[in-house]
Amino acid sequence: MNKLSLVLASSSPRRRDLLARIGAAADRIASPDIDESPLKDELPRAYALRLALAKAQAVDRQPDEIVLAGDTTVALGRRILPPAETVDVQRKLLGLISGRRHRCISAVCVIGLDGKTRTRVVETVVTFKRLTTEEIGAYIACGEGLGKAGGYAIQGRAEALIRSVTGSHSGVIGLPLFETRALLKAAGLPLG
């Protein structure tokens, strides 16, 4: 039997690091170019799942390849929060989630050797402490949340500002490992 190859449909170094935690390594990285704009009236869970599917399907898959894609969306109620592309957007996002609960929705899609698409969606509730203007400014100054959904990176300094996490910590980072491992095994990737 030919060696199976795992294709990660993401350029995220965080997803590569998370995969290593379950003993998996991408043989190939493919960064799909898809439109990530939410559809009119699209709910956060449906949005995350649609993006994970679109990313996986945008990759040219060879017969010996398993494709893995994911999307992590931050939502405040029914509202999809954008990535913090600028410092001003990041300041606004941190102000919105300050002292409140929000959801991190992680969708995973695996396309197996058989061409079958398998998906899981995991929701994690994250509660930030009430942030002062100084705390927001200091966090922005460290630079780690820029470009991130919700304006923060839980695996960095933001973790000290979070009161509680209910659900998948790895899902907030970008890939819920329990569900990802199960999907990869179901698709035929040998994992211990």
Image (cartoon, helix red, strand yellow):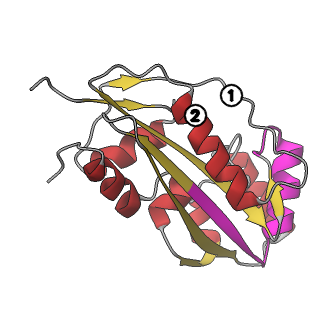
Asked if residue 161 lies in the magenta stretch, the reply is no
The foreground one among 119 and 175 is 119
Q: Are marks 2 and 1 in contact (CB under 8 Å)?
A: yes
Compared across the picture, whether 47 is left or right of 96 comes to left
Distance of mark 2 from mark 1, alpha carbons?
7 Å
Q: Quadrant of residue 80?
A: bottom right
Residue named by callout 2 = 55
Query: Considering depth in this image, is 96 or 182 the residue closer to the camera?
Result: 182
Q: Position of residue 4 (x, y in %)?
A: 21, 29
> Which residue in the protein does label 1 denote?
34
The percent position of residue 76, horizontal first and vertical second, equals: 80, 67
Q: Residue at x 47, y 43 (%)?
A: 14
Q: Which residues are magenta?
A: 83-106
* Amino acid type of the residue that numbered disc 1 sits on in the rendered structure: Ile
Whether residue 129 is situated above or below residue 91 in the rendered picture: below
143 or 113: nearer the viewer:
113
- Which corner quadrant holds the N terminus? top left
Q: Position of residue 35 (x, y in %)?
A: 75, 30
Q: Position of residue 47 (x, y in %)?
A: 72, 51
Looking at the rendered structure, the secondary structure element under dot 1 is loop
